[in-house]
Amino acid sequence: MIENIFKSAVIHQNKKNFSKARKIYEELLKTNPQNLVILQNYAILLSQVKEFKKSENIFKKCLKIKPKDPLLLYNYGKFFHDQKNF
């Protein structure tokens, strides 16, 4: 069930329906606050809507959960690259 809800958030995010995707991620995080996949996608979405400080805080939370996750490290690096913060 949670997987289907998560997939709907990803679909909305891909279609740039950020407000709907954000609501779904935030609801999922209420019951799954340490879920790395949800947190990471939420951080990416926040970056897409230019909420960089909040996005960075979520990425840092992810790094505390799994600091050597390759996808997480890639996305965190991309977060800085997209802001031209080298």
Image: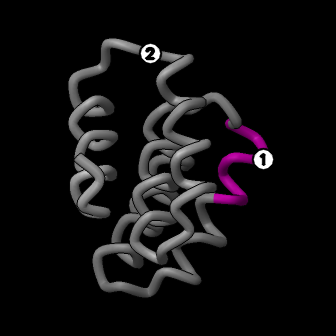
Q: Quadrant of residue 44?
A: bottom left
Pointers 2 and 1 in contact (C-beta within 8 Å): no
Q: Is residue 82 above or below residue 39?
A: below
Q: Nearer the viewer, residue 81 or 27?
A: 81
Q: Picture coordinates of residue 7 (x, y %)? A: 39, 60
- Check the image and report above or below for 70 versus 84: above
In the picture, the disc for residue 84 is: none
Q: Which mark is residue 66?
A: 2
Query: Range of the magenta residues?
Result: 26-32
> In the image, what residue type sits under mark 1?
Lys
Q: Considering depth in this image, is 1 or 58 the residue closer to the camera?
A: 58
Residue at left 48%, top 80%? Answer: 18
Its colouring scheme is: one colour
Q: Position of residue 43 (x, y in %)?
A: 49, 52
- Give the side of residue 80 with respect to residue 63, left or right: left
Q: Earlier in the sequence, mark 2 or mark 1?
A: 1
Q: How many marks?
A: 2
Q: Is residue 8 magenta?
A: no
- Main secondary-structure element of the magenta-colored stretch: helix
Of the two numbered discs 2 and 1 in the rendering, the one whose residue sits closer to the viewer: 2
- Residue 64 at x, y = what percent? 55, 17
Residue most toward the right?
30
Secondary structure beneath label 1: helix
Type of amino acid at the residue the image marks with label 2: Lys
Residue 9 at x, y percent in the picture: 47, 67
Disc 2 is placed on an element classified as loop
Q: Is residue 4 above or below residue 14?
A: above
**Residue most toward the front?**
86
Query: What's the residue at 58%, 43% (across, down)?
Result: 58
Q: Quadrant of residue 35?
A: top right
Residue denoted by label 1: 30
Residue at image coords 66%, 72%: 23
